[in-house]
Structures are given as structure tokens and as C-alpha cells.
Amino acid sequence: MIEVNNLHKSFIDKKNMVKALDGLSFTAKNGEITGILGPNGAGKTTCLRTLYGLLKADEGSVLVDGINVLEDPLAVRQRLGIFPDKFGLYERLTAYEQVDYFASLHGMQGAKKKAAIVQIFKDLEMEELAHRKTVGFSQGQRMKVTLAQALVHQPKNFVLDEPTRGLDVMSTRVLRNHLAKFKEKGHCILFSSHVMQEVAALCDRVIIVSNGKLAAQGTPQELCDLAGEKLLEDAFVKLIGSDEGVAA
Amino acid sequence: MIQFKALLIKELREAFRDKRALMVALSMGLLAPIMIMVISKTMIKEIVDNPPIYVQFTGAEFAPKLIEKFAVNNILQFANVPEDEKYAWQERNIEVDIPKDFAEKMLAGKAIDVVLRADFGKKASSSPIRRVKEVVREYSLAIGYKRLLVRGVDINLLQPIVLQEQDTALPTSNAVMVSMFLGIYLLMGAFVSGLSIAIDSSAGERERNVLEMLLCQPVSTLKIVLAKMTCASAISVLSIVIMLVLTTVSVGFIDLTKIGATFSLNAFSIAALLLLLIPLCFFATALQLFFSFQAKSFKEAQSTVSMLIMLPAMVPFAIMMIDDKPEWVNWLPISGQSMLMEDVFKGLPVDWAVLASTTAITVAMTVALVLALAHKLKSEKVVMSLS
Amino acid sequence: MNIKWQSLLALSLLSFSSLLLADNNDTQKNNKEILTLENCHLKGIKSQVQCGTLQVPENYSLPDGETITVNFAVLPAIDSSQNKTPLMFLAGGPGQASVELAAHIFSTFAEIKKSHDIILVDQRGTGKSHPLACDENEVSNAYEIIPEDFSPQEIKDCIAQFTGDLSQYNSENAIRDFDAVRVALGHDKINIYGGSYGTRAALVYMRLFPNALKSVVLDSVGPIEVPIGTFGQSSARSFNLLLDNCQQDESCNTAYPSLKDDFKAVITRLEQAPVNIKIAHPRLGTKTDFVLSRSKFISNLRMQLYSMQTRPLVPLVIHQAFLGNYQPMVGLIAMSEGGMGMYVGLTLNVVCNEDFPKITTEMFAGDADNTFGGNDSHSAWLQACPLWPKYAVSEDFYQSVTANIPTLILSGNLDPVTPPSNGDESAKTLPNNHHIVSKNSAHIVASTPCGIEIVNEFIETLDPKNLDESCLAELKSETFMTHLNGNL
């Protein structure tokens, strides 16, 4: 469960004050996939970074399973599985070593760690990749490794920052299936994107962010109803009040 | 501890799999002994070994004893020059003209003019010219002494004042050359060896988009910095150990005693050197990480950090140039180590108080850098520049 | 008038006759501690060396009795690793002080000093080890005095000045001191190099402390079996070789076609009456008398026979004397005017007790039957020794030495005092030795770089029979000064 309350965050960029978050609040519940939708520059990434504790909010709070990220960022990260927007790999390590590294960073060790790694490789159907160095992996293979490293410690909450960017159809399907499985197990999944179809297909609830504020929230159907449009995309454009920054 | 271990293992794995960076790192350790060997050999050759000199004599037949004296000192007639050296000696073109009235003037006790003609400004000729002059001077002096002796003059009259030089340097402190080189190489080794690893694991990781992921993990930035520093420092230490061992072994093959120098490192002095240099390795990598983490790109990190290499090269020279060193120079990193190393090489007793304080200051500065860096990595500025 | 120690000098074996003999100038202090060792400077050596003193009993059978201070120096190896066994240098004479020879050894033994410490100990009775020296009240005029004026009273006066029990200043006690220094410096074993009388000392060392020695070099040997004191035949042999070499050398033979006759003529002339002329003092430039007697002429010539540096002058000196020009002889005397650093009190104390009694009248007679100096080398012994205080020498002292230690024996063929036959004598009884005779060397083979190289190789390999001796063959045969303005 991730609760975001009244987040404010400003940056100084070339002597101009830029307000990235302006009182954003929302909740991502367990057993649900929550999508954050917003145009570029709406504050999605800032919001997520605040969530990880990389940035500190000027005002407001983020609670993950009831723990305030400002007070104990390490404990919060312990409960998060993170799939960053730009994922790189340690190209001189094998996939197994890479996942093992992140498992250890989460404090896992011994047989338990090993079992967890084997399990995640099996779950993601990537056993054959395990002992290859990650240099030269395809985008799909890289995604799988990143996913494995994010999930190996079986986090209660799972945050994905534009995960399907650059993925082919097959990879996207694998990811989608995996998210669905997670949801069934009662995990909380938060997921930022600007791909409408994906959000519409996956998310139980959608949060639309614009100019650092919550523009609207609800199930995809509720949002369409709210905007009086049939397609989520049209609803989105209507709700943020412009067609600026809408991706296909 | 699990986390630190995992961080360190990963860094070491990456470092050892990055063959190019590793080569750069260890090349110092391998190259320094070779450089020292080559330089020492050249110096010995120049100073002690009297390689043959080929001189164009005219009138050699007028002074057979003088020619014989030249030959004893390996100064030979140009006609004897081997084919492969012919060009070089033709270039130098050192000529000695012996007048045909040599014998006549010698027996008459008149001054004989022997001409030495060469390009005195040419560097390659300076050593041969010096040797030719030396032989003529000695030969001439010996005859002069005998002339006076057989005339019933006390030949000691020719030396009214004998300057007795008393060198207060310790008997073992004449290994200056080798130790000076090794000292600089060791300092360079401490700074350069871990350099590429340090840049790769900081600016490199940022450029490969893996740093943000790491910063999102439930691990303190202090541990991250410590692991990266430990890894890069370990490589430096390895490089230095290789350098010390190889130098000790390779210098054994050179007869340094020919130039009145000695160089031997026993287990104790190697231990003392490591004790001195290991903190410096950590200091160096901490400094490099500090700057390269703040660089915006790999390239920028490389150029910023490369400037740091100047430190170990410049500081010892600067110290050599200053005759009256202020006391505090003893305590600073690099300069302190540099001066203590000199003592170790000279076989002087180690000043443990200075060693302890230099080490303490180096360690303190390293700790300060690490803490500052760990703090910086938490700052928003670093995070913002990630993308 | 004071004693003509100068003329007596020519009687002893000597180890190095060098133009540059050094006076000791170290910073050693007279401490009461058993062993002191400190950095110091010795004259003629730029770098610091180590000086020390050791208190030893004057009489080793009375360990609680009187003590004397033994002075020593260590010339540290350039290679400071201390890996190699040091070399102790035993000086000649008897009566030379090793530490006073430091500068000379520092340069000639450079090759050995690269990796071996060199230990120099002033033999008791010399240098700063309770020297047996006499105060010379007035500066002697070496140009006026002649050995024939030598008077017994001067010897008696000198003996009266000595302190201590003279009977303890013998060869065996000297070795006990040397070994005490070895122990005090903490060496299990040392190499020893003895030159001239130093070989006699080395042989005594081999007999007394064979286990303390790793190797021994005997350069220009004074065997136990051959008493020191009869140099008539050996110097005549050396002189005749010089005459032969001059004859075989074209320029020398041209310049001095009748050198042998010239020599005889000068001797005959001087036997009739000493030459007495006015000269400019070689050092002061003032007018002074110069008296040249037969004995003075011969003993000074003999001194030149020791060294390859001075032998080339001999034909010229003889020929000029024949022509009535004595200035070359004056120059030679001037060269050694400052003395040779010989502690003649010790020389006589040792030789008069350990060697002189062993020389029979027949031996003296046989030795005098030669074509160079006749009995010239005997008279000083015959005058001084009967006056000298006696001590009993143990019979063991005269036993041939048979210690099984790697031993290198070196002889110079032109040597006027320790001919190659001496080396053969010692070689007879030593089980592990090799005797090398250098054709073109005189006294002390190790005075050439080649000789030092052989010594160095030997103390590295300890295998006397497999040394590379080839460089000795390359030593040039002697050439001579053929003109007052030099040769061509």
C-alpha cells in the first residue's frame, strides 16, 4: 500500500522556480494495479523519485505500508520493488550475478537467497539466460533481468516507471502476465505510463497527473464516464485540459 | 555486512573482468621496474663502463706511449671502429692531432701542443671529450711528477693543499637514483593504478544508467562509497606490491655498486613502505571518486581526475626544490609519504611519530572525503543529474 | 742525533709501498666501554665509515690484569644487505697499522667492498692500539744521515720509552685481538686477507682459530718456515730480473746498455767513500748537505723494487748516479721522507724474538752471497736484536700450518722480499690451497685491479683451484723511464 499525501516539490532550474509537484495526493492499494498517467513534465518521475526517497518533498508525505519515507528511506526501499525508467545492466556480470547482487543488497543470503533467485528465473522463463554476461542482451532480455532484480526479494509493493518503453510485443506480454500474477497475490503495483492502451488494459485504477496536481482518478471506465468519452485517450486529453504531450 | 560484501564482490568482479582497465591499472606496477632497470643500466654505462671511443688520430706514430695510454682507457683509433658504430663516430668526429716534434719537445722538456678538435656543444660528444681530456691530463701529470722527482724535488710540493672531503651522509644513503625513481613511481602507482577503476565505477556507472537503480536500493550511500573505494584501492595496492617485488627482483640483476649505489629492500622496508602507501592508495581513490562522481559524464570525469595525477608527480619534485621545508610539509599526504620513503630507501630509521601522524592525517582526510561523498550522493543535485 | 728508523724500514716486509700513505684521522674516543662503534671519517675517504675500539687484556693468560685498547675500523660494503661474510685485512710490516691504510684499501679493494664489509684492526703495538713508537725529538734530515751511523744507544733510549709488557706484543696475541674484534662485531666467520707480514699473521690465525675462518688469502707470503730478516738473495733476484727486463726492452737497453756495470761502478765508488754534496733541500729549497753511502744507496734502491710503480725509475737512478748526478736518488728519498707509517718498535719486537733467533750464522752467510746488496739487509738486525728485550716463543708457533680452509696463495715473480718460493713453502702443508704466481707483479699481487678481481672471485666461490687467472697474463711486462724528461 502506497499513500501519497499532498506532495509539493519545486526545483530551481536556471534561476526559474519550477513547481514539479503541487499538492499531489493518491493511494495505490494492495491487490490493485494503479497507473499514473500524465503528459511529459507532469511530475511522474519526480513523484516516483520522492517515493524512493531519492528526492525530499518540500511538503506532504509518502507512506509505504505505513512507513514514512522521510523518516526511514531504507525501510521503505526494502518494501519496494523498483523498475526504473532507464534501466542499465552491469554488462560485465552474468544475469545470475546481477540478480544475486540485488538480492544481497536486500539482505538475503545463503540457501534462501539461492532459492529465491532460482524461483524468479523460473517465473520469468529466463533460466537459459542465467549464466550469460548481460552484454549484448536484447531489449526484452534486459527487461527480464531488470524485472528479476526488482522482484527477487519479493517486495510487497512494486513500482514501475514507464516499463514498456522500447519493448516488443512479446516482452510486453510477459511483463503484463507477470504483473497480473502479482496482483492476484495481493501485491500493490504502481505503474507510470503514457501509453493509453496499456493503462486501459492493465490498470484497476488510473491517476491522471497534470502540472504536478492530481487531475482525476478512478477506474478507466470511471474516467471515460467522467469525461464523457468512449476512449480513455480522449478522456485523458479532456481531463488534463489540453492535447499537449499526449503520446500514441 | 552482507550488503557491503555484496557491493565489494560486485565491484571486484567488474574490475577484474574489465581487462583493459585492469591492464592500465597494473601496467604501472609492471612498467616501473622495467623503467628503473633501463635507466640504471644507461646510467651505469655512462658513468662507469668505459665504452670504446673512436678518435681520429693524426700523428699517432709520434707518440706511441700516449696512444698506448689511450688504448688502455678504451680510446681507440678510428680505423678500428666496428661497422655498426661507424656512422655515429663519424658524426661526432673527434680529432686528436699529435705534432711530429712530439718526441723532440718531450726530450727537450718543452710544452707539447696536442690538439683536441670536436663539437664541444654536442651532447653525445661530451663524455668522450671528457675522457680524452682526462687521459691526456693524467698522462701529462705523471710525466711532470717524474721529471721533478728525478731532479731531486719533493713531489709533494705540487699539492700544497689537499682537500679532505668528509661526506656526512650515512654510508647507506647513496641509492639516491633508484630510490628517487621508485619513490615517484610508487606515488604515481598509488594514484594512477586505481584511476580507471574508480572512474568506471562512478561516472561510468552513471553513464550506463545503473547508478540510479543502486541508489534506490535499501543500502546506505556510505557503504556504496566504501565498497567502490576499497575495490579501486585494492587494485592500487596490488599494483604497488607488484612494483615493489618486481623492482627488488630486477634491480638484483644490475650491479648498482658500480656507481656506488646500493638498493635492497628487505621484508621490513617493504612492510614499512606498504604501511605508508596503503593509506595513500585509499586517499587517492577517495579523491578520484569524489571528483568523478560529480562529473557530468565519463569524459569529464576522465579529464578532471587526470589532473589529480599531477599531484604525486609534482609534489616530490617541489619538495626536492625547497631547501628549507616548513615543518607542516612532513605531515601532509603525498609530501609526508614521499619524505618518509626517502628515509626508508636510505636505510635510515623510520621516524614512527612522523609516520603515525602523516598516516593519521591521510586517513582523516580520506574519511572526510568519504563522508562528504556519501552525503553528496544523497543530495538531490546528484539525483537530478542522473537523467 | 736520532734513530734512523728510515733505514731500518727497508728491512721489514711491508705490505703496501704507496706514494700516498695515510695518517689516521678518525674521531674515535677513548671510551672505557668494551666495544664502541660509531660513524667516523678516516683521512682520504670521503664517505663515512665506522670506527671502534675494544678493550682486551694485555696478557691473555691474565684476563683480569692490565687491559689495552685495540683500535679498529669497518669499511661498510656498498651493498648494505649484510649478506656476505666480511673480509678482515691483516697489514704488513710487522709494524703497519691497518686503520692507517684505510684510504688505500678503500680504493684498491673497491671491488670487494661492493658486497663485503672490510675490517681493519690496528695490530697491538701499532696505530692507536698501544703503539710502540719513540718520540723523535728533532726532525731528522734524511739527506744527511746514513745507516752506517746507526748507534745502539738510540735503540736503548727508545726501548726505555715503551710502556707495558713488551713480551705481550707478539704475533699470537695480535691474532687473539683480531679474533676478539671478530667476536665483538658478531661474525661467526670471516674471510681474511693477509699481505706480506699479514700472511704470517694469517697463518697464525689459521692455527689458533681455524673455525673462525671461511677463507684465507695469502698475498706475498712470509711462511712460518722462512724467518723474516734475510732479504739478500731475494732482493738480488728481483734486481737481476729488473736488469734482464731492461736488457730485453729495446729502449731501456739503448738508453742503458751497460746498466749492470754502472751499478757495480757506483757501489765501488760509494764503498771507497760516501758522496757528500750540497743540494737544494727537495722540500724547503734551502741549501743542505746530502750524504750518500753504499748502504743508503742500496736500501733506497731496494725500496723501489717492491712496487711496479717505482721499479721503472731504477735504471735511470743508477745510470744518473753513475754519471755523477745524484738528484734522482735525492728525489726518491724525498718521496719517502715523511715515513712509511711503520711502527718500528713493534717490527723489532716481533722479528727479533720470533724470527731472528731462527737465523743461523750459515744462513746469514749464504744470504749475503749475492750481487746486489751483499749483507746490507742484515746489519740493522744484527745491531738491534741483541739489545732488544727477549720473550719466549712457544714451539707451536713454528709448526707448519695445516688448517683445512680454502686458501689462495699469491706471489709476484718480481718480489724482492717474498719470492714465489715462499708461497710454495706454505702451499706444501695447506690441504686446500692454490698458489698463483704473477709474472709481471712485484710485492703484493692484489695491488692491481686484476689481482683484486681474483681475490674477489675466490672469496665468492671459495674454490681456489678454479679461478679465472687470465687477466694476470695480460699484465704488461715492465717498462722503464729512459730519459730525465720522460719516455716516449
Image (spheres, rainbow, N blue to C red):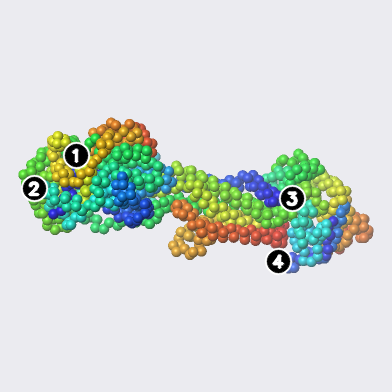
Which three-letter amino acid code belongs to the residue tagged 2? Pro
**CA separation, marks 4 and 1?**
113 Å
The answer for which chain carries disc 1 is C
Q: Which callout, 4 or 3, points at the residue further toward the start of the chain?
A: 4
Residue count near mark 1 (Cα–Cα under 10 Å), binned few <14, some 14–19, many ≥20: few
Number of the label disc, if any, that sits on residue C274: 2
Residue at (54, 47) in percent of width and height: B241
Q: Residue furthest left?
A: C272
Find the distance from the CA under tag 2 to the CA under tag 3: 112 Å
| Residue sitting at x 23%, y 41% | C392
Q: Nearer the viewer, residue B104 or B68?
A: B68
Residue C239 percent coordinates (x, y):
17, 38
Cα distance between the residues tagged 2 and 1: 32 Å
The N terminus of chain C sits in image quarter: bottom left
Label 3, on which residue?
A107
Q: Amino acid at mark 4?
A: Lys
Mark toward the viewer: 4 or 1 = 1
Image coords of residue B9 (percent x, y): 67, 47
C444 sits to left or right of B363:
left
